[in-house]
Image (spheres, grey):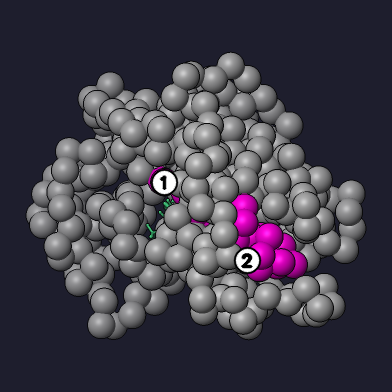
């Protein structure tokens, strides 16, 4: 794959000594433990998906967030992973603001791609699996005639998507790798990040017009089900080596962002109309893929926990918002920008 100049890797000029390892995590180093008892290292543990992965297996993980391990420092990341000697690594950290990534490609590539190279190398040396969470945005510049399948050739159309695809390439350097492509994440826990869900709800709460693109396709995906599927895949592949590879994990059916927004507001009890607009009416810094919906038969054939139809989950999801942080509370303090309802 030809790369733009700013996608080239940074030289490894970061500290690699033992002090790189957070002190609280040093106790869990566990090379003497049998494989099954060694913890799984979750990178991006303070994020929406990373946090959920940790909540589902609190006894089985070492959690590292950005404050403990800044992934812009690849040599340090490699050293920390090797030092912790986990049973597996789940790389769920990323810079996910697509427009920000377009403006800051170096940082975007450092976190979303070059850190994966470092972590994959550490995993390869340790002989442990790497799970890399990727995005349906690696596709979408053209219409494949149906949802994208795992074997379809990617065609990334912005810096974020290119960085995720490069991250996938690096993840493949680890012989036992899982690349999990997903999209359109939503959760009953309000995200600290201002994602699509938060911003649509905020606009409705503020009595603003809600304008959402109706010609871009995605799969709204419920984070707890995605996390459950990732744990299943890690275990299934660990039992049967031939299964390592790429999987698409999303809720069905495919939907436009406009339909997603309408369902979201309906589930949250708003009567606010959603105005459908075309991509050209909503200038965003980064071009978005028109068709980024994924086929999930490969995952389904493994017999893992089923992924529910997303409209069903959405209603329950909004009901489950903690009472202290109700939908209305979630919306306060949200900044409203023109790009706020842009697909993520
Ligand atoms: N959100 C979506 O709709 C979506 C769609 C498709 C694919 N994905 C992929 O799914 C994965 C999880 O996404 P998410 O929505 O859970 O993301 P998120 O909520 O934005 O969380 C991202 C995580 O990455 C961490 N991070 C960012 N920069 C870092 C750095 N320099 N060093 C270490 N950690 C850093 C963040 O730490 P801080 O909390 O400290 O910032 C946070 O823990 C990502 O790989 C993303 O590309 C997401």
Marks 1 and 2, how far apart in space?
19 Å
Q: Is residue 162 left or right of residue 189?
A: right
**Residues shaded magenta:** 78-96
| Residue 262 or residue 168, whichever sits in front | 168
Disc 1 secondary structure class: loop
In this rendered view, identify the residue nearer to me: 296 or 47. Answer: 47
Foreground label between 1 and 2:
2
Give the residue drawn at x 56%, y 23%. Answer: 155
Residue at point 73%, 32% (across, down): 151
Q: Residue at x 66, y 65 (%)?
A: 83
Query: Magenta segment: does it hold 264?
Result: no
Q: Residues within 10 Å of mark 1 (few under 14, many from 20)?
A: some
Does residue 155 lie above or below 216 as drawn?
A: above
Q: Nearer the viewer, residue 245 or 145?
A: 245
Asked whether the viewer can see residue 225, the reply is no
**Measured along the vertical axis of the image, is residue 239 above or below residue 159?**
below
Mark 2 lies on a secondary structure that is: strand
Determine whether the beta carbon of the residue marked 1 sits less than 8 angstroms from the nearest atom of ligand 1: yes
Q: In the rendered view, would you say 314 is above or below 321?
A: above
Q: Dot 2: few (<14), some (14–19), or many (≥20) neighbours within 10 Å? A: many
**Label 1, on which residue?**
95
The circle on residue 41 is 2
């Amino acid at each position: 794959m030809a790369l733009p100049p700013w996608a080239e890797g940074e030289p490894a000029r970061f500290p690699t000594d033992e002090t790189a390892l957070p002190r609280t995590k040093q106790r869990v180093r566990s090379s003497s433990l049998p494989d099954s008892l060694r913890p799984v290292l979750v990178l991006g543990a303070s994020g929406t998906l990373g946090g959920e992965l940790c909540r589902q297996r609190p006894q089985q993980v070492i959690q590292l967030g950005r404050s403990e391990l800044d992934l812009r420092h690849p040599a340090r990341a490699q050293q920390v992973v090797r030092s912790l000697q986990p049973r597996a690594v789940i790389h769920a950290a990323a810079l996910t603001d697509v427009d920000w990534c377009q403006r800051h490609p170096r940082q975007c590539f450092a976190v979303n791609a070059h850190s994966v190279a470092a972590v994959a190398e550490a995993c390869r040396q340790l002989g442990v699996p790497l799970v890399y969470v990727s995005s349906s945005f690696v596709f979408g510049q053209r219409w494949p005639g149906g949802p994208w399948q795992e074997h379809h050739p990617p065609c990334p159309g912005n810096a974020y998507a290119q960085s995720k695809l490069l991250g996938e390439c690096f993840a493949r350097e680890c012989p036992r790798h899982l690349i999990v492509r997903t999209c359109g994440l939503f959760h009953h826990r309000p995200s600290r990040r201002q994602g699509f869900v938060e911003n649509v709800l905020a606009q409705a709460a503020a009595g603003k017009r809600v304008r959402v693109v109706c010609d871009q396709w995605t799969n709204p995906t419920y984070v707890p089900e995605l996390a459950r599927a990732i744990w299943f895949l890690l275990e299934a592949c660990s039992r049967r080596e031939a299964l390592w590879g790429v999987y698409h994990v999303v809720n069905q059916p495919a939907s436009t962002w406009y339909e997603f927004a309408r369902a979201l507001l309906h589930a949250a009890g708003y009567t606010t109309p959603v105005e459908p607009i075309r991509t050209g009416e909503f200038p965003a810094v980064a071009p978005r893929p028109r068709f980024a919906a994924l086929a999930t038969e490969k995952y389904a054939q493994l017999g893992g926990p089923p992924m529910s139809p997303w409209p069903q989950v959405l209603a329950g999801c909004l009901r489950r918002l903690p009472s202290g942080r109700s939908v209305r509370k979630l919306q306060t303090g949200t900044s409203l920008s023109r790009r706020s309802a842009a697909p993520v």
